[in-house]
Amino acid sequence: MHRFAAQMRLGSREHVRVLTAPFIAHAIVADAAAALAARSPTFTASIESRVRLDIETWVGQENFDLGITVLPISHPAFQVEEFLRIEAMVAMLPDHPLARKDIVDFEDFIEMEVIVTHPRSIIRQYLERLCRERGRSLKVRFEATNGVIACQLAGRGLGCCLSDPFVARSSGVPGLVLRPFRPVFPLHYGFLYPTWQSRSLVVEDLASEIVDIAEAQSKTLGTDT
């Protein structure tokens, strides 16, 4: 604890301040930090989480070395670099009617009772845009503050939801089934680097670990949780 506090005060180049969404910390960042710590006994980190809904606020007020979030975001104080692209998937229990399908089409999705996230979420906005374009409407049974809660409700058999598959895996719901959704909704993951400071080698190393772990996990996202 004393070493950690000293590194924080002195701005140690082996210390990384990470700012990310909670589900990214659970799904990706923790494993990356563990891998780097195993290689470097002097590596330390502080990991803060903020919900994506408040991202425009926290990137302008928080002091960090590396931010990780789902894009888009544009802020003059930060350089944004995309590092991964995945697709939103439909999450449900194995006995849900749509679980028998290899791919879930929008027309199939809207025939079911669904769980949605808050109106400002990018996935909710995408679904509502599809509804406007096609003159259809969702059968919303439950609305959740975030994707984790939406997946947990789906895990109770209360419907299905369109979800970031990393969020679904972070929800803690055993046996959740994930199926590709069409039309495709790509989710872009990116790093945020403060433009007023140079990147240390340890920041670059942690970012590289995050990329490797995210890419490896993305290859298994079509499998059930």
Image: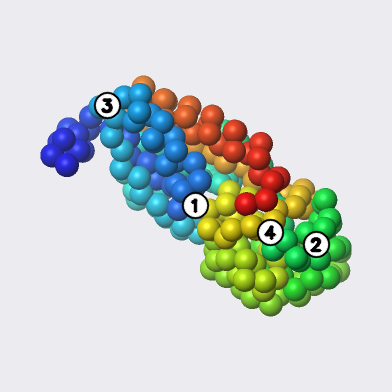
Residue behind mark 1: 23
Give me the C-alpha separation between circle 4 and circle 3: 39 Å
Residue type at numbered disc 3: Pro
Of the numbered discs 2 and 4, the one sitting upstream in the chain is: 4
Please say whether residue 81 is visible from this viewpoint: no
Residue occupying image coordinates x 36% and y 49%:
48
Residue type at numbered disc 1: Phe
Of the numbered discs 1 and 2, the one sitting upstream in the chain is: 1
Which sits in the foreground, 102 or 212?
102
Please say whether residue 24 is visible from this viewpoint: yes
Which sits in the foreground, 112 or 128?
112
Q: Nearer the viewer, mark 1 or mark 3?
A: 3
Determine which of the numbered discs, if any, sits on residue 98 in the image: 2
Which sits in the foreground, 205 or 64?
205
Residue type at numbered disc 4: Ala
Q: Is residue 153 left or right of residue 57?
A: right
Residue behind mark 4: 91
Query: What colour-coding does the image apply?
Result: rainbow
Q: Is residue 126 left or right of residue 169?
A: right
**Mark 4: which secondary structure?**
strand
Residue 109: x, y in percent?
80, 64
- Tell which residue pokes out farthest to the bottom in this image: 141
Residue occupying image coordinates x 75% and y 65%:
95
